[in-house]
């Protein structure tokens, strides 16, 4: 809203477009608060799990910046390992598209969940939902070959969205 001076007093733009804009901003902020409450509840239910924000992790080459809840494995180490290995996951997807035409029609978002042992070796790998069994199996086997940096302490959980888009 536009505030201007009206003879020493502040005036507020109360036109319909200005009020609509204000309502839109309010709705956006309310949705953001709901989303943040949901993320907080998830973090409290799963302490020690690294939640990778889907808006910043893109398997198709975008920069990633996950938010970590706790543990001795750093954000930068998780990002680096994912970036170094994302091509193998994309290859699993492209191989599956050749055999399963339904995968070619739209983008899909998967959730990768795994534990990283202090030795840097991934364990307890989950990829969901299961759009294609062979693709999921390929991805799980590929992730098993990933090596994160070693660290001290307990295993750290990592959860990351993975958005795959067919080439047009």
Image: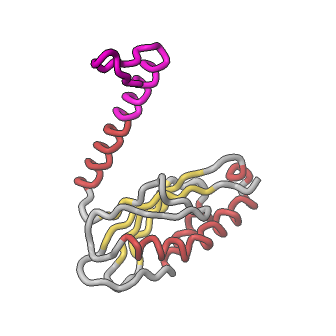
Residue 103 point in image, percent of width and height: 68, 52
Relative height, residue 59 to residue 131 (above, below): below
Residue at 26 percent across and 48 percent down: it is 41
| Location of the N terminus (image quadrant) | top left
The image's colour scheme reads: secondary structure
Pick the residue in front: 77 or 13: 13
Give the tally of numbered discs: 0
Does residue 65 belong to the magenta stretch?
no
* Image spot of residue 58 (x, y percent): 55, 59
Residue at image coords 40%, 62%: 66
Residue positioned 32% across, 64% down in the render: 68
The quadrant holding residue 88 is bottom right
Residue 79 lies, with reference to residue 3, above or below; the image says: below
* Quadrant position of residue 164: bottom right
Q: Position of residue 161 (x, y in %)?
A: 48, 57
Q: Is residue 33 left or right of residue 147?
A: left
Instruction: Give 21 or 106, whichever is nearer the viewer.
Output: 21
With respect to residue 128, does 12 lie above or below? above
Say above or below: 107 vs 50: above
Q: Position of residue 85 (x, y in %)?
A: 55, 75
Q: Residue at x 53, y 72 (%)?
A: 83
Left or right relative to 141: residue 157: left
Q: Which residues are magenta?
A: 1-30
Task: Tell me if residue 26 is in the magenta stretch.
Answer: yes
The answer to which of 130 and 168 lies nearer the viewer is: 168
| Res 70 → quadrant | bottom left
């Amino acid at each position: 809203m536009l505030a201007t001076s009206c003879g020493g007093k502040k005036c507020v733009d109360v036109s319909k477009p200005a009020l609509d804009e204000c309502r839109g901003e309010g709705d956006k902020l309310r949705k953001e608060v709901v989303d943040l409450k949901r993320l907080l509840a998830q973090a409290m239910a799963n302490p020690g799990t690294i939640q990778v924000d889907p808006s910043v992790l893109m398997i198709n080459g975008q920069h990633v910046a996950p938010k970590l809840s706790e543990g001795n494995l750093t954000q930068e180490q998780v990002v680096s390992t994912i970036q170094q290995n994302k091509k193998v996951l994309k290859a699993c997807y492209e191989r599956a598209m050749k055999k399963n035409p339904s995968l070619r029609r739209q983008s899909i978002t998967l959730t990768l969940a795994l534990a990283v042992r202090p030795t840097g070796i991934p364990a307890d790998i989950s990829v969901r939902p299961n759009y294609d069994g062979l693709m999921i199996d390929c991805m799980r086997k590929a992730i098993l070959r990933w090596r994160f940096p070693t660290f001290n302490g307990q295993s750290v959980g990592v959860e990351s969205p993975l958005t795959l888009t067919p080439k047009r």
